[in-house]
Amino acid sequence: MYRTRAYRYENEQVVLILTLLVVLGVIVLTSTATFCLSGVFILAMFLISALLIRSHHRALMERAVRVDQARTPELASWVAACGLKLQPGPVDVFWVDQKQINAYTFGISSPKVLVLFSSLPKVMTGGELQFIIGHEMGHVALGHTWLNTIIGGMAGIPAPFGAAVLLYTVFRWWNRMCEFSADRAGLLACGDLHTAVSALVKLAAPEIRTQRDFERALALIDAEDDLAANRLAEVFQTHPMLIRRIKALRAYARTREYQHIQAGMNRNLGNQPPAPVPALMVAVQPEPEPDFVPEPELTPQERWPWLKPKDLP
Ligand SMILES: [Zn+2]
């Protein structure tokens, strides 16, 4: 049988090799350009974030109440106790007049900044406030504040829609892992699981006053993860569902590792008297029987006895 490929046109293979070289060259060039542009984009995002952070810090220094022994001695002592236990490094703590139940921290360089909203002392006991302060200090100690700026910038690089969604969800996934870590710091700071759980419940239901209120709120929170829609929505959230956070804290509190770290952090307090940690659910009063009598409204001086009158909202 006669078989040949000798009729192939002379330049076919030469042009094939040239074509392959050009294709590879374009791939290398475009990927290098994309890589370099991504680097430039991330650097630009980082610089913009740094400028925004600096101006926010300055605005807080001008307008907010700095938490210190002179202005807010009781709050300052809780902050100091949390700082001694968690050793987060230099942190400027501010107190701002806001209705929301919230606290946050930020900063790339030292000192980092921790902001507490004035609504917190209205609904939280001292121990619960220590959980909140400890949670935020945990973010600082674990480097979440500056990592958030860098990783957030990287996850925000322009990308085709599918890739952008992937980057966004994976960044949020990391955000939620950070919250679990910070909750552990909050538990270590307040030193009491029930206090930590009641602080978390109050984030969702700040109005709770009685044990029954607390149990109802906890039952609602407990049902959060039953719905598939909630589980799906969580994928795009910065914070895990409260019930997941509560379950994670309960599991952590049972570990030897927690006991060991808690003992070490308590030693950090040295000869200082232990920070005020209330007994189980101090904020949740025993339920009045037979009729519920609401607690009287507290005056600002009763709510924040550590504040001087000029600082009261
Ligand atoms: Zn957090």
Image (tube, rainbow, N blue to C red):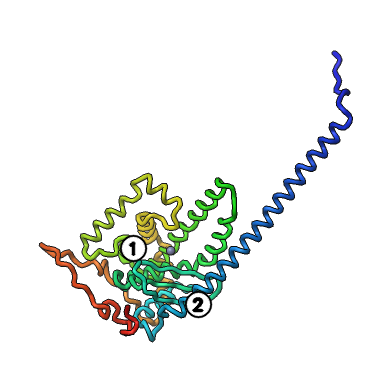
Graded by Cα atoms within 10 Å as few (under 14), some (14 to 19) or many (20 or more), the crowding at tag 2 reads few
| Amino acid type of the residue tagged 2 in the rendering | Arg
Q: Is residue 262 visible?
A: no
Graded by Cα atoms within 10 Å as few (under 14), some (14 to 19) or many (20 or more), the crowding at tag 1 reads some
Q: Which residue is drawn at 34% across and 65% down?
A: 196
The residue under label 2 is 58
Q: Quadrant of the rendered structure where residue 183 is?
A: bottom left
Q: Residue at x 24, y 56 (%)?
A: 216
Residue 69 drawn at (x, y percent): 39, 84
Which part of the image, by quadrant, shows the C terminus?
bottom left
Mark 2 element type: helix
The residue under label 1 is 203
* Lower position in the chain sequence, tag 2 or tag 1: 2
Q: Which corner quadrant of the figure contains ligand 1? A: bottom left
Residue 54 drawn at (x, y percent): 53, 73
Mark 1 element type: helix
Which part of the image, by quadrant, shows the N terminus?
top right
Image-based side of 164 in relation to 215, left or right: right
Q: Determine which of the numbered discs, if any, sits on residue 56 in the image.
A: none
Q: Can residue 194 be seen in this view?
A: yes
State the residue lying farthest toward the bottom: 70
Please state which of residues 174 and 294 is positioned toward the viewer in this rendering: 294
User: On screen, 288 above or below 118?
Assistant: above
User: On screen, 250 above or below 93?
Assistant: above
Please state which of residues 36 and 5 is positioned toward the viewer in this rendering: 36
